Amino acid sequence: MKYTITGATGHLGQQIVTALSQSVAASELHLGVHTPSKAAGYQAQGMVVQTIDYQQPASLRALFQDSDVLIYIPSKSHDSYSRVQEFENVLGAVQQANVKHFLVMGFIADQVNNPFALSAFYGYVPRRLAGTNINYTIVRNALYADPLVPYLPELIERHNVIYPVGDAALSFISQEDSAAAFAKVATTPALLQSGKIYTLSQSKAYTMPELAAVLSEVSGQSIGYQPVTLAAFGEMYDQDNEGAMLASMYAGGAMGLLATTSDDYEKIMDHPAQSLIDYLQMNVPKS
């Protein structure tokens, strides 16, 4: 078997490689990376590492050729147009490289009325794939719980969660749980159903007062909820020019469009996803 993963040195990509390596021989893992030096450890384990450029279809075809399962993790870009262009390059390479099954990462913010800057991309992908003869499966993630860990000290200092989502709720999944589900789907023929869309989330979505209560319990500090405006949030977190994109995501959240929950994770893994409080208690450093 040939399992191919793009973005293999990114946060989720690394977790997927780790999860797959528990049940798949290293020689069966083919990793597409942008910076080969970051993948030296994988090469040392016997995995095949190839440099790819999403704007160079030949490099994609070389990596994808005769893959039994190709796991596509989109690159980190801030607008749908760039990602759609990337996806079309990937799709063209998939169609030319005899890929048997295309396993694609999605996100719950894919609704037609979602103002999130990347919603158009996440909505485009399933519609585009539905019009092809490719065997594909999509795995949609809820918000990652992981960024809450490094963000917690700032929230403690502010004494408040500040996400501008009003009374709406947010749903989460850890990257480790997401990766485990990706690996299970990729290696289980009964789960790798063409046209199937899975949604990965914890069992509960949290309103901001509920999230603040969880963070308070985990940290031992009093944290409330005092939202800032969308404009202020975008200005506060505009590192790497991500502010407008992040603000647009929470604009969708304020409409209730980031509150999706599903039992798909439990159906895939035979146990529920780790709860938010359990995840944080395991990962927040003890003072």
Image (cartoon, rainbow, N blue to C red):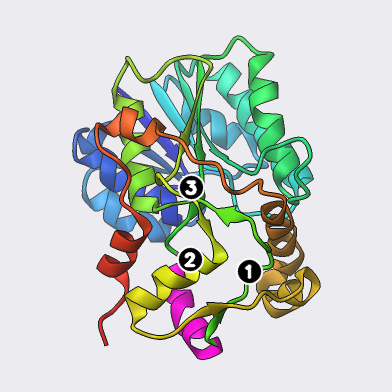
Which residue is drawn at the image coordinates 25% and 37% (left, top)?
271
The percent position of residue 126, horizontal first and vertical second, equals: 64, 26
The three-letter code of the residue at mark 1 reads: Tyr
Q: Which residues are drawn in magenta? A: 147-158
Q: Residue at x 55, y 42 (%)?
A: 260
Residue where numbered disc 1 is placed: 163
Q: Is residue 27 magenta?
A: no
Which residue position holds label 2? 211
Apparent side of residue 41 relative to residue 202 in the rendered image (left or right): left
In what quadrant of the picture does the N terminus appear?
Answer: top left
Return the residue nearer the eye: 184 or 72.
Answer: 184
Q: Earlier in the sequence, mark 2 or mark 3?
A: 3
- How many labels sit on residues? 3
Under mark 2, the amino acid is Leu
Q: Residues within 10 Å of mark 2 (few under 14, many from 20)?
A: many
Q: Establish if 249 lies above or below 214.
A: above
Secondary structure found at label 2: helix
Residue 285, horizontal then vertical, whole percent: 29, 79
Q: Secondary structure at mark 1?
A: loop
The image position of residue 33, as x and y in percent, is 47, 49
Q: Left of 125 or right of it: where is 20?
A: left
Query: Looking at the rendering, in which quadrant would you find the C terminus?
Result: bottom left
* Front residue of this view, candidates 55 and 70: 70
Disc 2 versus disc 3: nearer the observer: 2
What residue is shown with label 3? 7
Task: Residue 155: say if magenta.
Answer: yes
Question: Mark 1 to mark 3: distance in Å?
Answer: 28 Å
